[in-house]
Image (cartoon, grey):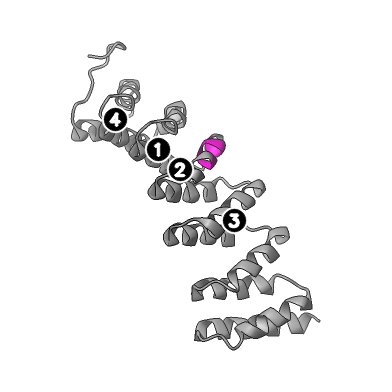
Amino acid sequence: MSDLGVQLPTTHDAVRELGSREDAAALKTLAVAAAVDDQFLRRTALEVIGRHPRGRELSAIVLEAFRDPSEYVVRAACEIAEQWRLLEAHDLVLSHLANASGATRQAAIRALGAIWRETDFPPMFNIYARDHETGIRREAAWVLRQRATPADRRILFDALYVDELARHRVWACELAESLSGPEILPALSSLASDPDGHVRKAAARAIQAISSRA
């Protein structure tokens, strides 16, 4: 029994069962379960909160979870922020882009993509350019591709068109189509002879689109 007079669930199944209940007692129990000593029970409680029809009533619990010492709990909080598009979590998510855990950085990248602000481009670009894990850089590139504003697209193009990953060079070609100036054509011409056929086709399309507007 907790100090709040709630019977603490002691198994993952008991916590998950609370997800099928929408009464106030279930919410109170979930809130308590999210603060138990067992980090894995805390994570399960957060996962249930994230799916619960009334889960948003426990937003404060989710926000507090970003400060949890357990990376499992922090990642669960990131997933909820992504799922709910929880704007209040923005700065907390942003702080985890520098987390020592690659899995947590990846979860934060995904969450930030869902609650994006234009000012997030520089720190996300820094992750893409400098993170030591290839998978993390690719995750950041995906978010940048989706979220880059017209003002940022040339910066992203200049990075992607020399990327070793062919998919990123294709994205560079697609970005180029939204850049109206003919000054982009020399870079696209080099991609038109790229070793990868998908890149060559994308470059040809972009060159045609830009040339037709000239």
Q: Residue at the spot x=62%, y=76% of the render? A: 173
What separation in Å lies between label 2 and label 1 (alpha carbons)?
A: 10 Å
Magenta highlight on residue 93: yes
**Secondary element type, mark 3:** helix
The disc placed on residue 74 is 1
**Secondary element type, mark 1:** helix
x, y percent for residue 31 = 35, 24
Give, as a single range, the part of the protein colored magenta.
89-94
Query: Which residue, as the protein is rendered here, is positioned at the far right?
Result: 214
Decide which of tag 3 and tag 4 comes sooner along the chain: 4
Type of the residue with mark 2: Asn
Q: Is residue 95 visible?
A: yes
x, y percent for residue 150 = 71, 61
Dominant secondary structure, magenta = helix
x, y percent for residue 169 = 56, 74
Q: Residue at the spot x=44%, y=51% of the render? A: 106
